[in-house]
Image (cartoon, helix red, strand yellow):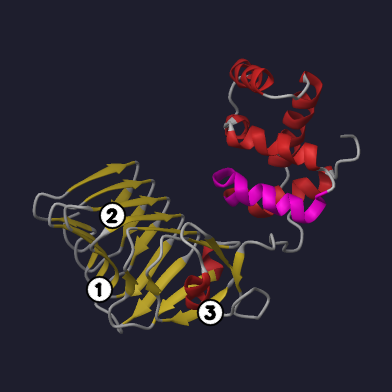
Amino acid sequence: MQDFPQSLFNSLCAQYRLQFLQNPKFFKALLMDSCGQFKREIRLLTLLLSKGIVKQLQHNQTLTKVFELVQHIQQESEYLPTEITWAIDCWQQALECNEPIPTLMPSDVLSVSSKGQGHFTRIQQAIEKAQEGEQIVVYPGIYRETLLLNKPVEIIGFGKREDVIIQCLSSQGLMLKTDYLVLKNLTLSGEHVCETLIHLSQGQLILENCQCLATVSTMIWIEGLHTFVTLQECKITDSQGTGILFSQQSRGIIKNCEITNHAGHGVKILSESNPSFFESQISNNHKNG
């Protein structure tokens, strides 16, 4: 393990930290493409990630807590204590590093680039090609599209969310026709062309680290008893009406979000809907909520 390329690992972690922590499969695929000769090391580093030890390190948990998790890994795997200690040190160094290297993407992850550097130049092309549950990584750029979101996939912006912009061209907004969808690290926008930017009338939508900026009547509308939305670390601002509308007994979780500067309500809850809010800012809206 002495020859493992720590500097490369540090740089990849700085570039892909959000994807790594949430998706060990993505992490393993990227390392196998970058330094696949270190199979044993990659398996061990992935194991620590999937078992939650990396998150414990990231949140500065006590060494006692970390070692408790390490003991479980030692009992369940063939790795030696010295190897596990090496892997922990490797992750600790990587989590402290903030210098990314040029883009590297696993060959089996669908990618979209408006500049032609991915598998596709349009997001809709990737959706049509994707299998259920597959990830689509979108490189920085402005994507002016009519999107039919009809598969349970994850669409993840690469880099800063402000740099990955989806401008909706449909009068119906972003059309969700699936029971499960994840959107991460994106800017979603639309101007005058649609009444509602995102309308969820079925299934579950997860919006994480996204911002919605659009001159529409309603930014996000969640409707129906069997619909559920999760918004985490999102910024919902500057609509011409309501920021988030819950209706017809819909439900959701809003956590660490900023919902501000709407011409109408920041949040409007109708018809026995029951969303939960945690540590979110709802302010500077023309009407209540």
Q: Quadrant of the N terminus?
A: top right
Q: Dot 2, crowdedness within 10 Å: few (<14), some or many (≥20)? A: some
**Label 3, on which residue?**
122
Name which quarter of the figure residue 111 lies in.
Answer: bottom right
**Magenta stretch in the rendered image:** 19-36
The CA distance from mark 2 to mark 1 is 15 Å
**Front residue (pair 95, 53):** 53
Residue sticking out furthest to the right: 3
Identified at 66% across, 80% down, the residue is 116
Q: Which residue is mark 1?
A: 240
Q: Is residue 12 left or right of residue 226?
A: right
Q: Which mark is residue 283?
A: 2
The disc, 2 or 3, on the residue closer to the chain's N-terminal end is 3
**Amino acid, disc 3:** Arg
Q: Residue at x 75, y 41 (%)?
A: 42
Task: Pinpoint residue 60: horizontal percent, then vertical percent.
Answer: 60, 28
Circle 3 SS class? loop
Pointer 2 or 1: first along the chain: 1
